Image (tube, rainbow, N blue to C red):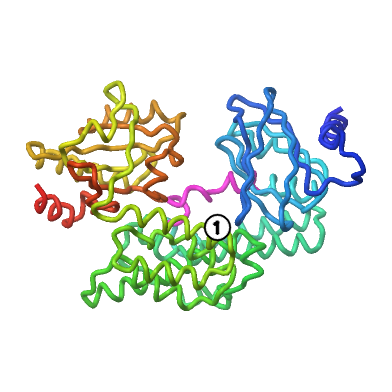
Amino acid sequence: MKQLFRITLVLLCCWGCENEQKTEGMILSGSISGNDVPGVIKIRANDYEKDVALGAHGNFIDTLKIERSGYYSLVIGKNNTIVYLKKDGDLYLKADTDRDKFHKNLVYTGTFETANNYLARKRELQDKWNYSQPDKLFVLEEKAFKKVIDVQKETLDSLAEASALPEDFAALEKKGNYYEYAFHILRYPSFHHYFAKKDTLDLDEDFDTGIRDIDFRNEKDFINIPAYKKLVFYKFGEEMNEKYSKNKAQGMESNGHPEFMETIRTYPRGDIKDALLLRNTYYLSPVSDNLEETYRYFMAELQGEKAREKVREKYEKVRKLAKGEPSPGFNYENFKGGTTSLEDLRGKYVYIDIWATWCGPCKAEIPYLKAAEKEYHDKNIVFVSISIDKEEDREKWKSMIEEEQLGGIQLITDKDWKSRFIMDYGIEGIPRFVLIDPRGNIVSADAPRPSSPEMKALLDTIL
């Protein structure tokens, strides 16, 4: 009966397509149940983005016109998983949004169903491990840590071998397992230092022997294997941090821009460099002294037109956020009732903290923000905190304000990351701070954090 329903959906999708023997693209259909059925499911990978609307009973069907067969991220409510999609064919999925049941009950039928059911079982297995609990994995001493990740890799390899997968897909999966293993090895020194709270770490000489020969410029694996892409991103960050630490030891203060430019120049043009540039558009900053030079470099090095268009849009947006330009406005719900707009605050300097209850670095700034509010309470400035928490976390936002006795003006956006003010300021990461003058013009679109001495120096200068 379930198979008949899936076939019926496919037939309905093609109804009325005269003179067509085959639908271009892959037909994705399914049924979502549970206590938290979303309005849409999301499919993401590289430059591909697709939102598929669900019907009243959690059923859906759509045609995905993807450029290449491969791994895609599938987001269903608060759950996410990896799915393997082909350029054509059909795939039907049945899912339960209950987080404890999601991967256990996730079932596929249709094109490449064996591979996708294997991926669901693999993720179910990983959910039982400490992949999402780095504090438990990386606090382990070296030998215990190595034993855990060795067993995990062997278990995943055995699962791939026992799942009757196509030979080429099984090989791809085992290579991905190796890169996941390498990712853990690469992170261990810094993560163990952080979670175990150790100042020094003496590793065995052969600790990273198994990953020393990895080529971090492999374009094919970058496109085809998610674990490798994650590994490359981390390696790039490590290279930047090494340069930053070296410069800092020599007394050179830096905002990270010189280290970023020095590191990115070592990468040849291609998909990897495009992805790294797009992940670091932060350096196209409205307060940067190198904005024009950085923009020209990005545009000269990017090879993908979609990537170039994204950077072009970011640059045009950033140019409008220079000091002295009129600030984008907002009008958001106030914790104390009603709404508050930027216009309501005219006549005062406005220091804005963009944050969220789930953001650790944001919460780390709270004591410093409280201190600043107390120090400048009789000056011509107001402190505004704008939360980008999602609608379902609204009560969590209210509770945290009460429990932490947060001061200033507490607001929450209407569409989290997609709220107009957030998008107008090109905010892609938090915490982020903005300073606006009494006339509503920008003083700094990327102001110093409360914990930074530069913040007090800036306020002392203008107040």
39 in relation to 302, above or below? above
Which stretch did the figure color magenta?
Answer: 123-138
Quadrant in which residue 138 is drawn = bottom left
249 in relation to 333, above or below? below
Q: Secondary structure at mark 1?
A: helix
User: Residue 307: within the magenta?
Assistant: no
Question: What's the amino acid at mark 1?
Answer: Val
Residue hosting label 1: 148
Looking at the image, residue 98 sits to the left or right of residue 111; the answer is left
Residue at 33% from the left image edge and 69% from the top image edge = 290
Looking at the image, residue 118 sits to the left or right of residue 299; the answer is right
| Foreground of the two, 19 or 30 | 19
Q: Could you say where residue 363 lies in the image, as x and y percent from the top left?
A: 30, 43
Q: Could you say where residue 83 lies in the image, as x and y percent from the top left?
A: 69, 48
223 in relation to 28, above or below? below
| Foreground of the two, 74 or 382 | 382
Residue at 62% from the left image edge and 34% from the top image edge = 40
Residue at 21% from the left image edge and 51% from the top image edge = 451
Give neighbour class at mark 1: few <14, some 14-19, many 20+ (Cα, 10 Å).
some
Q: Could you say where residue 221 lies in the image, as x and y percent from the top left?
A: 65, 67
Q: Could you say where residue 264 lies in the image, as x and y percent from the top left?
A: 45, 73
Looking at the image, residue 294 sits to the left or right of residue 199; the answer is right
In the current view of this chain or complex, which residue is farthest to the top? Answer: 337
